[in-house]
Image (cartoon, helix red, strand yellow):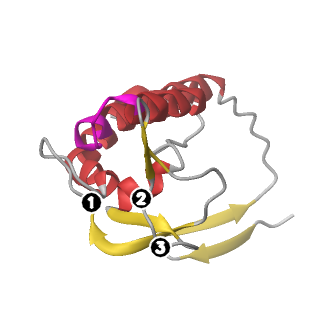
Amino acid sequence: MSAKTFHFEGFSIVLANMRCDIRLDRFSRQFTEAQFWLDNQIMTDMVPHMPFLTGTFIALTRGQSASLAGSGMVVAGVGPMGRYLHEGKVMVNAATGKGPANIPGVGPRFKQGAKLMATSRGLKYSNGRGPKWVPVTIAQHKQEWVKEVKHIAGGG
């Protein structure tokens, strides 16, 4: 029986009568550990850039991200406030055009079920924090994440 060869850019595949039993259990554990580390590190590195008033927004976001750690998903901002805080635009009730009502002891809140829309006005942030903290975090930490994931996964 003759072997069949398939050529691709940069490599070729030769089909022949060969049997190979490869076990990747060791790598599976390392990949899982690397993903878990990465998910947690992304959340940790985002915190200094996220809006901070009382700490509740960050605590809720951390909680949701922790429940997903190892899945390859990280919560950038817990809803519903995460969307408008990340985008950095003042939100109003789409039906009334008004902002949230101030509830004593709680703070500004929209009525439950209100549909919101973004305005062109930007939110005001303090302590050097601001909108779009995900791309800022990625730009600052991507290379360190890649290096450490390679180390944990056994590739560097």
Q: Where is residue 92 in the image (x, y as percent from the top left)?
A: 45, 66
**Dot in front, 2 or 3:** 3
Residue that label 1 marks: 123
Looking at the image, is 140 positioned above or below residue 8? above
Amino acid at pointer 1: Leu
**Segment colored magenta:** 46-56
Amino acid at pointer 3: Gly
Residue that label 3 marks: 97
Viewer-nearest residue: 85 or 117: 117
**Dot in front, 3 or 1:** 3
For the residues bearing labels 1 and 2, Cβ distance under 8 angstroms: yes
Q: Where is residue 149 in the image (x, y as percent from the top left)?
A: 38, 35
Q: Does residue 149 appear in this view? A: no
Viewer-nearest residue: 90 or 146: 90
Amino acid at pointer 2: Tyr
Looking at the image, is 25 positioned above or below residue 139? above
Residue at 34% in and 65% down: 89
Whole-angstrom CA distance, mark 3 to mark 1, is 16 Å
Q: Does residue 89 appear in this view? A: yes
> What mark, if any, has residue 84 been given in the picture?
2
Residue at 42% in and 61% down: 99
Whole-angstrom CA distance, mark 2 to mark 3, is 16 Å
Mark 1 secondary-structure assignment: loop
Q: Which of marks 1 and 2 is nearer the N terminus?
A: 2
Q: Which of marks 2 and 3 is nearer the N terminus?
A: 2
- Crowding around mark 2 (Cα neighbors within 10 Å: few <14, some 14 to 19, many 20+) is some
In the rendered structure, the answer to whether residue 96 lies left or right of residue 88 reads right
